[in-house]
Amino acid sequence: MSISRHNIESEEAEEAATDAQRVPAPAYRTANGERRQAVTGKTDDGRLLTVVLTRRTDGFRVVTAREASPSERSAYRRNAK
């Protein structure tokens, strides 16, 4: 998982991914056909992260996570109102 290079703990990525006010981006498929979904959400410490997820039979798996971009932050704030 490439979240370590972004200074993000896996627990933070999971918090953002399960945030009740998370904002989804359109889902997409990778070249090998895997369906992925990006969501922007807030951690318990208030960080806004964009997390890319893929579904598994037992839930989801975090593929990567990073700080949310300015446009992703704006979308989250609009949704949170």
Image (spheres, rainbow, N blue to C red):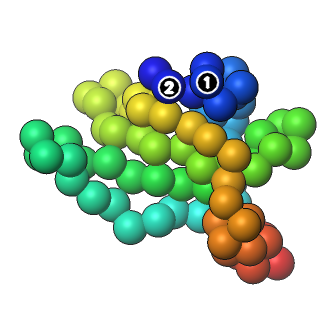
Q: Nearer the viewer, residue 63 or 58?
A: 63
Q: Position of residue 2 (x, y in %)?
A: 50, 25
Q: Position of residue 19 (x, y in %)?
A: 68, 48
Residue at (60, 49) in percent of width and height: 50
Closer to us: 17 or 32: 32
Contact between labelled residues 2 and 1, with CB atoms less than 8 Å apart? yes
Q: Against 56, is 43 above or below?
A: below
Q: CA distance from mark 1 to mark 2?
A: 6 Å
How many marks do you count on the picture?
2
The residue that appears at 62% across and 41% down in the rendered structure is 66
Point 42% across, 41% down: residue: 53
User: In the rendered structure, which amino acid carries the disc numbered 2?
Assistant: Ser
Asked which secondary structure carries label 1, the reply is: helix
Q: Is residue 76 visible?
A: no
Q: Which residue is mark 1?
A: 5
Question: Foreground residue, 59 or 27?
Answer: 27
Report the residue marked by disc 2.
Answer: 2
Binning the other alpha carbons within 10 Å of mark 1 as few (below 14), some (14 to 19) or many (20 upward) gives few
Residue 64 location (% of width, % of height): 49, 34
In the rendered structure, the answer to whether residue 44 lies left or right of residue 48 reads right
Does residue 48 lie above or below 14 as drawn?
Answer: below
Where residue 61 sits, quadrant-wise, is top left
Say which amino acid is labelled 1. Arg
Quarter occupied by residue 6:
top right
Vertical placement of 23 versus 66: above or below?
below
